[in-house]
Image: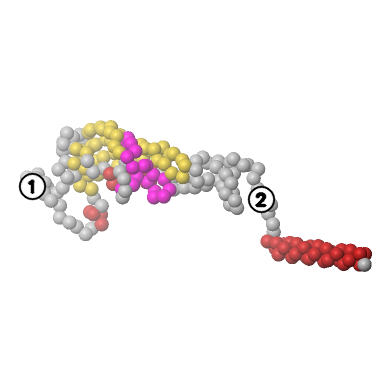
Amino acid sequence: MFDTHELGRRPGALQRLSRTVEAPGPPAVFGIDGVIGVPEGAPVELDLRLESVMEGVLVTGTARAAAEGECVRCLEPLRHEVAADFQEMFTYPDADDRGRSHAVEPVDDAEDEDTLFLEDGLFDLEPVLRDAVVLALPMQPVCRESCAGLCSECGVRLDENPDHHHDAVDIRWAALQGLAETVQDGEKDNMGGAEAGVDEKQEK
């Protein structure tokens, strides 16, 4: 939670904050499940600019953190530095003619449901940070752009074995190749039988 009481409600008032927070754990994970994300408890550095406006407090900032994941090509662990920019309006609860805040009635309108409100001068930045960090992360993370990945047939890392290859066999000839090998094996068996017969005759 961040406190805006020091900022006040005078439109145009500004406040700058720098703070380090810990990345939350499930279910509010800062990342893409199973691909890449900021580990639970990892430091997230925030640079914030709070501006008082008529409707509430406009929060602009940048979140910096180190995300961890797995290369989609070679499956090796990787580390990715992420910087996520964001801007969000936190609205004052509705006020009566005397300027006193009162509870906001639940509404069905989708736009109003997405509105974030200040509660007793406090605002929760976690959902905003989560969305910003996720959008800043790569959907297909790689350890480096030149990563050659793994061999599709045996799984060997191609970066470590640049000359690795498999002899390609045309599937149209695969059946004939198998038939030829069978014929050769049969001929060998026949030749072996014939030689045995000759040996027997010679012995007689």
Q: Which x, y percent locates residue 171?
A: 68, 61
Magenta-highlighted residues: 28-46
Quarter of the image with the N terminus is: top left
Task: Identify the residue at horizontal 41%, vertical 37% (top origin).
Answer: 81
Q: Is residue 50 left or right of residue 146?
A: left
Quarter of the image with the C terminus is: bottom right
Q: Point out the tag, 2 or 1, that comes first from the N-terminus.
A: 1
Residue 108 falls in image quadrant: bottom left
Q: Is residue 30 above or below residue 185?
A: above
Task: Identify the residue at horizontal 13%, vertical 51% (top origin).
Answer: 103
Task: Identify the residue at horizontal 19%, vertical 37% (top origin).
Answer: 3
Q: Which x, y percent locates residue 178?
A: 72, 63
| Disc 2 crowd, CA 10 A, few/some/many (<14, 14-19, 20+) | few
Q: Which x, y percent locates residue 200?
A: 89, 66
Residue 112 inside the magenta-drawn segment: no
| Disc 1 crowd, CA 10 A, few/some/many (<14, 14-19, 20+) | few
Amino acid carrying label 2: it is His
Looking at the picture, tell me which residue is in the foreground, 189 or 107.
Answer: 189
Q: Is residue 96 left or right of residue 181?
A: left
Task: Identify the residue at horizontal 33%, vertical 47% (top origin).
Answer: 29
Determine if residue 181 is in view: yes
The secondary structure type at the circle numbered 1 is loop
CA–CA distance between discs 2 and 1?
80 Å
Determine if residue 132 is in view: no
Which marked residue is nearer to the observer: mark 2 or mark 1? 2
Residue under label 1: 97
Amino acid carrying label 1: it is Asp
Q: Which x, y percent locates residue 35?
A: 43, 48
Residue under label 2: 166
Looking at the picture, tell me which residue is in the foreground, 133 or 105.
Answer: 133
